[in-house]
Image (tube, rainbow, N blue to C red):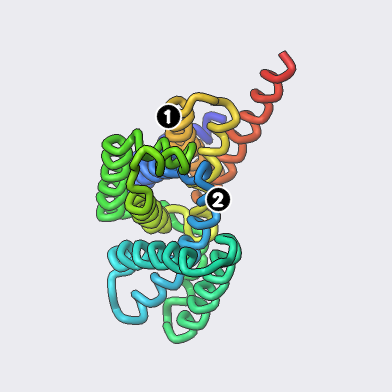
Amino acid sequence: MLDTLDRITELMSFPFMQRALLGGILTGILGGLLGSFAILRQLSFFSHTVGHAALLGIVLAVLFNLNPTLALLPFTVLFGLGVIYLISQTNLWSDAVLNIVFSVSLAGAILALSFVEGYRGNLMNLLFGDILAIQSIDLWLTTMVCLVSAVSLLLTHRAQVLLTLHEGMAKAQGVAVQQHQAWFIVLLSLAVAVAIKAVGVLLVNAFLVIPAATAKLISHQFAWYVLLAIGIGALSAILGIVMSAAWNLASGPSIVVAQFGLFAIAILVSRLRQTS
């Protein structure tokens, strides 16, 4: 036990671990904030689709000698808006369109990857992330997206809540539904883009869904629900990084396991409330 604590303390003294911890907390906060709105708007699979499309964006950036971190931001935004436009132009269910786009973008990424020599070894990092490789630019980008998201949602709080809880009432009260929805898609796409470095393509959706779903189980007031989702997102990031440092585990999957642990506790708490 003491050896484990000494190992954690020693690792936390290194700058790369401090950046990883800060990056995990920021990503957890951002995921909890936007995820709390996204799951109520049934956009969880949308973020999953954008997350997998990000793999195509990264591969294309490498193929054209662009900075993957910077190129990913406009790519995910344009992709997210394009998907919403495509859904609006068809009579199909949104999940059907998202499944089509999801499959095509993933297939495109795999095909494009075959043209990129010398980068295939980083495929595991793309899929599962490498939070220990977070640099200062990643922290700045995540901080900026987090601040822009928080300020935007705060300034448009009434409209966002109405859109989330009752879109019909929002339209009746004159809320610019399409503009607010489009802006939220932009924020959600940016959140996915900055979280890719930390948790990878396959796990990024967990940051947006699991903390919010956990908060929903134990809170029935909207304000507390959002705050709890943010807190759970940050706490699970801390627990996951500490767990990965203690037992030399992959950090991204460790965070997701921590998120699920909190989710399981929330299920138990909600069941105990129902029986008491």
Q: Which mark is residue 227?
A: 1
Residue type, mark 1 in image = Leu
Earlier sequence position, callout 1 versus callout 2: 1
Foreground residue, 155 or 243?
155
The one of 23 and 142 positioned closer to us in this rendering: 142
The alpha-carbon separation of the residues under discs 1 and 2 comes to 24 Å
Could you say where residue 244 lies in the image, as x and y percent from the top left?
Answer: 52, 45
| Residue at disc 2, secondary structure | helix
Q: Position of residue 176 (x, y in %)?
A: 33, 47
Tell me which amino acid carries mark 2.
Pro
Give coordinates of residue 129: x percent, y percent: 46, 58
Q: Residue furthest front?
A: 172
For the point 38% across and 40% down, the residue is 160
Image quadrant holding the C terminus, namely: top right
Q: Is residue 197 above or below residue 276?
A: below
- Which residue is pictured at 39% across the width and 57% down the height? 189
Q: Tell me, yes or no, if residue 11 can be seen here.
A: no
